[in-house]
Amino acid sequence: MTKIIFQGYMLGLAYLVPIGMQNTYVINTASKSTGRRIFQIALIASILDVLLAMACFFGIGFILESFAYFKTIVMGIGSAVILLMGFKLIFTKVSPVGEIEDELGIGKLAAMLFAVTWLNPQALVDGTFLLGGFKALLSPAESPFFIAGVAIASVTWFFGLAYGVYYLKRFMTEKVLKTINVLCGAMLVFFGVRLGIEFLNILK
């Protein structure tokens, strides 16, 4: 079963590595956090992503496709929340390293990570086709090992990303942090606009 776990691990990495909303938020938050907060960021991101992968693996995307009104609601809320997060990053003054710990409680951190992970119905649908497609090729006995590989990929990726940014931030000046804020914010705005356009198209 090692081969099946490895296949799940590689597919998980292929799904995670492209810079999307999750990675953007983790990079931005980790660049302004101290050591104890980095662990929380990586752990919460990993848990939410593993839950998302499991949901996709077992077909939540098909539920969204079957109940169009639910998909529309999620899309509208997701667009608004992600746009708000993006503009806040762009226009908010840069906080010194560690100050974010005082500004962002664990509950709010989890809520923001939930928003960038789960409030994108298209990601749920795409993930379902990607992971669900592989599930169709696996036997019932192989499926748990495959999704375990995907989960391992999620944990190693987010811990590596968060701690990688953390150890590199010593080279980050206030100008660099502001640039990261603007770039990350712009990417979130882009994703939010995409969701918003799809939401408005559905309402037509």
Image: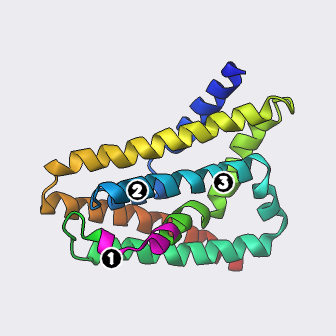
> Which secondary structure dominates the residues rendered in magenta?
helix
**Rendered position, 203 above or below 100:** below
Check disc 1 and report the residue beneath it: 103
What residue sits 48% from the left and 56% below the top?
Answer: 22
Labels 1 and 3: the sequence-earlier one: 3
Label 2 residue SS? helix
What residue sits 36% from the left and 60% below the top?
Answer: 37
The mark found on residue 26 in the picture is 2
What residue sits 74% from the left and 46% below the top?
Answer: 57
Check disc 3 and report the residue beneath it: 51
Q: Nearer the viewer, residue 65 or 145?
A: 145
Q: Residues within 10 Å of mark 1 (few under 14, many from 20)?
A: few
Q: Residues within 10 Å of mark 2 (few under 14, many from 20)?
A: many
Say which amino acid is labelled 3.
Leu
Say which amino acid is labelled 1.
Glu
**Rendered position, 44 above or below 199:** above
Q: Nearer the viewer, residue 94 or 75?
A: 94
Q: Quadrant of residue 150?
A: top right
